[in-house]
Amino acid sequence: MTPGRVAVLLLAVFALVFIFQNTRHTRIRLLIPEVTMPLSTALLAAAAIGSFFGAYFMRRRR
């Protein structure tokens, strides 16, 4: 385990704790009509999309 991997693992744990602490319902509107969903679901979806794109671009760079 390199220090970089430990840091990424800690950040991922902190992000998950933050996401699951925010369970209140909120209104979200993007391109579709307004929907009401738990904030944790929206944060988890945003984190997953960001992770996907980050992994994709890092893989392309190599």
Image (tube, helix red, strand yellow):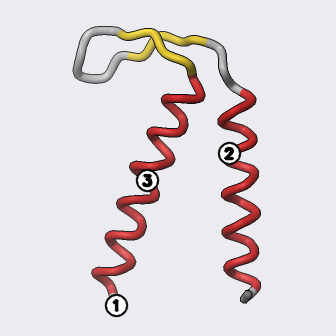
For the residues labelled 2 and 1, the Cα–Cα distance comes to 28 Å
Asked where in the image residue 53 lies, by quadrant, the reply is bottom left
The count of marks equals 3
Residue 5: x percent and y percent?
68, 79
Residue at the disc numbered 1: 62
Judge depth for marks 2 and 1 and give the one in front. Answer: 2
Q: Which mark is residue 15?
A: none
Residue at the disc numbered 2: 16
In the image, taking residue 43 as reference, residue 36 lies left or right, namely left
The amino acid sitting under disc 1 is Arg
Of labels 3 and 1, earlier in sequence is 3
Residue 12: x percent and y percent?
67, 57
Residue at the disc numbered 3: 50
Q: Is residue 51 above or below residue 5?
A: above
The amino acid sitting under disc 2 is Leu
Q: Is residue 55 above or below residue 22?
A: below
For the residues labelled 3 and 1, the Cα–Cα distance comes to 19 Å
Asked where in the image residue 40 lies, by quadrant, the reply is top right
Q: Secondary structure at mark 3?
A: helix
